[in-house]
Amino acid sequence: MKERISLVAKAHERIGAYLRPGAIAIDATVGNGYDTLFLLWQVAPGGRVYGFDIQRSALESAETKINDPELRACLTLFADSHARMAEWIPQEDHGSIGAIMFNLGYLPGGDKAVTTRTESTLAALAAASRLLSPGGIITIVAYPGHTSGAPETERVRRWCEAIDPQCFKVELIHAKPNDDTAPRLFVVTRTCVE
Ligand code: SAH
């Protein structure tokens, strides 16, 4: 799907400007591991990528893509829901996360029944906004074109709309501006220090 690739590329482009070696990032939906690998390239050496996926098979397949020991040394994976990210991430890293990526929906080529769900996505976004460092970035690629993706995308849009504008800036990038079912990218940056 062309739109998916172009939005993920845009998310990478934006995130690349926010991360440096030594930084900390979260991949909230590891899936095939491409975003995880991208984040590792940005933060290694010396940084950390925390990755979450509820499918252990996804984490295993992601791990096979990360062969470089220098990158592996920077990676910590959790087989749990991103809704619980704040419980897994060490306290000393709270408020120091430079970038958090969400790629919602189901795993391409995987089990389409295992998809992100509105309630856990919203819980994860709330946690992510608290874990983010000042000047940090959250990207969310959402897919309104499938049954459960439409209400999920709408709730993400409302979450972005309701976020404190004194503290966060939100941008919306459409893959196809006049197509309600086309994927879209939400970019949330934290502008305040407190
Ligand atoms: N639809 C995207 C890929 C999304 S992959 C695309 O086309 O590129 C989404 C991943 O999120 C899947 O691997 C799935 O297992 C994972 N996932 C679903 N619910 C989750 C949750 N609550 N916490 C963490 N990962 C989750």
Image: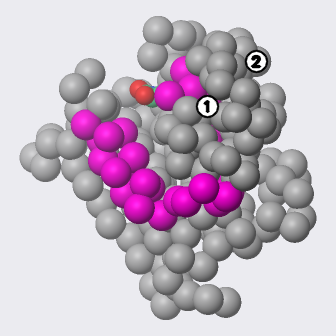
Magenta extent: 6-34
Residue at 47% of width from left, 9% of height from top?
A: 109
N-terminal label among 2 and 1: 1
User: Is any atom of residue 84 visible in this view?
Assistant: yes
Label 1 near ligand 1 (CB < 8 Å):
yes
Which residue carries the number 2 mark?
Answer: 56
* Callout 1 crowding tier (Cα within 10 Å): few <14, some 14–19, many ≥20: many
Q: Height in image: 151 above or below 68?
A: below
Residue at 63% of width from left, 46% of height from top?
A: 44
CA gap between label 2 and label 1 equals 10 Å
Which residue carries the number 1 mark?
Answer: 30
- The residue closer to the viewer here, 57 or 35, is 35
Q: Height in image: 57 above or below 174?
A: above
- Residue 53's image quarter? top right
Residue 114 included in the magenta stretch of the image = no
Residue 177, x across and y down, in percent: 13, 49
Q: Secondary structure at mark 2?
A: helix
Residue 33 included in the magenta stretch of the image = yes
